[in-house]
Image (tube, rainbow, N blue to C red):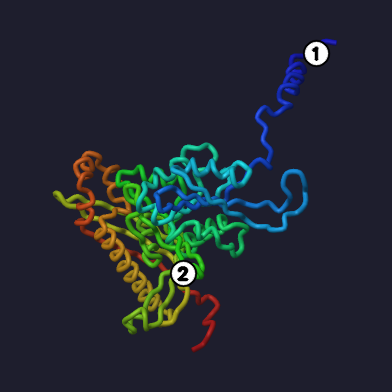
Amino acid sequence: MKWSMAKWLTIFFLFVLSGCWDKFELIEFGFVQAIAIDQTEDGKIELTSHFYKPAGGGEGGTAPVKEKGPINIRTTGDTIFDAIRDIATYLGRKAKFDHMRVILISEQVAKTNNIEDILEFFSRDHEPRATFPIMITMGRASSYLDEKPFIENTMGQQLRKMEETTSRYSGKTVKTNLLELAIQMKSEVGIARFPYVYRMKNELEPINVAGIAIVKKGKLADIVSPEESAELLMMTDQYEGGIIKVPCHDQGTTKQGKMDSFEVDRVETKLITAVEENSLRIRVKTKIKGAVGELHCAPIVTNEEEKKFSDHVQEKVTQEIKKVVEHLQKKKLDAIGIGNQIYRKDPSLWKRWKKDWDERFARSQLEIAVDVTVTDTGMNVGKPLPK
C-alpha cells in the first residue's frame, strides 16, 4: 500500500511534537499577585512579594492546606532582580510574574530614586505584562499588602479593583499601567501620573486609593488631593464618571451649608494653545453632560430652575479647574501636557521653549469655558419625598 505525503507528515509530527522539550510543572512556581518596593536604612531595595496560596496540597500530596490566603515574602538586594532571585531561598519555588495585579512604590523610594530605574526589571523581563497598575503609597508600601482584603482573594487584586472602580465611578484617581507610564515618561514634558494609596490617620484606618501622585524627571514631585483629582482628569480627558458637589448659594460656604449633587455621565475637554508674541495662552473648553443626583438647595421644576442649577455646576467646575491649574503653575508641573501639545503643533517653537518650559508654563495665562448640560432631573416619577 502506498502512503500519501499527508500521512507521512502526520506520523512525523506525532513523533516530534508528542513530548515537551521545555517542561515545567505548576508546583515549581509561586505566582506573584503584587509587589511592594521599599528602601532599607542603608539604601538597599526591600522587596515584598505577595503570593497567591493555593487551597490544595503541595508536591507529594493532595491534603488541603489548613491556612488559606496569600503570603508575603520579604527580600532585600542592591537591585530589584537581586531581591527577586532571593525569593526562592525562602519560598522554595521560582517566582512567576505573569499574573501580577499591581506594583506599589513607597513615597520614600519615589522621592529618592528614579522610578524608571526601579521598574527597569519589570519592563525588560518577558514575564510581567505591561497592563498591571503602578501606585505610589503613603508610608511603607509593604504595610498595604499585610492587610486582609475585604472581598477579593488577595490584597493585590483588592487594590487593583479599588483603582479601577475609584477612577470609573468617583473620578478621584487615575489608572496608570506600565505601558502608559512608559509613554508619559518619554513624552516631551516627562511627567507621569500615578494612583495614590493612603490611610486617613494611622495603620488602623481603612486603605484608600484616591488622589494622584505626580512624577517629574523620574521622581515624585507632588500629590494632588482626591478633591482636586477630578478636574485634573477632566483636563487630560481621563474622567470617566463621578459626582460634582454644588454648594447652596444662599448659604455662602460649603462647610456649613447644604449641597446639591450632579452625576457626571460624559466629559469632553479640549486644550487649545495660543502663542501671542513670546507668551502663551491656554484655553480650556470643557463640555459636561449629566443628571441631577440629589437636591437640598432648591427644586428643579421649570426650565429656569434647571438653567440656574446648570449655571451653578458650571461655576463650581470653572473655579475648581482654575484652582488646579494655578496649583500646578505654582509647582511648575505641566501635568496636563501643554508642552506635549506645543511640540506636536510646532516642533521648532518647542525646541526654543523646552529649556525654560517650566517657567513659561508657570507664567502662561488661562481661559476656562465650561458648558454643562442637564440630561435628567430625576423627576420622571414625580416628587419622591414631599417637604
Q: Which residue type carries mark 2?
A: Asn
Check residue 283 in the rendering and tell me which mark sits there, or answer none.
none
Query: Mark 1 highlights which residue?
Result: 3
Q: Is residue 224 left or right of residue 95?
A: left
* Residue found farthest to the top: 2
Label 1: which secondary element: loop
Residue at image position (77%, 14%) is 4
Residue at image position (58%, 48%) is 32
Q: CB under 8 Å between callouts 2 and 1?
A: no
Q: Tell me how far mark 2 sits from mark 1, CA to CA.
A: 77 Å
Coordinates of residue 120 in the picture (x, y in percent): 43, 41
Label 2: which secondary element: loop
Residue 209 seen in this snapshot: yes
- 303 up-or-down from 105: above or below: below
Coordinates of residue 295 in the picture (x, y in percent): 45, 79
* Front position in the image: 34 or 78: 78
Coordinates of residue 7 in the picture (x, y in percent): 77, 18
Q: Which residue type carries mark 1?
A: Trp
* Front position in the image: 370 or 1: 1
* Residue found farthest to the left: 277
Residue at image position (68%, 41%) is 26
Q: Is residue 163 left or right of residue 31?
A: left
- 233 up-or-down from 301: above or below: above
Coordinates of residue 350 in the picture (x, y in percent): 23, 43
- 165 up-or-down from 30: above or below: below
* Front position in the image: 34 or 284: 34
Q: Nearer the viewer, mark 2 or mark 1?
A: 2
Query: Mark 2 highlights which residue?
Result: 202
Q: Residue 371 falls in which quadrant of the image?
A: bottom left
Give neighbour class at mark 2: few <14, some 14-19, many 20+ (Cα, 10 Å): few
Q: Earlier in the sequence, mark 2 or mark 1?
A: 1
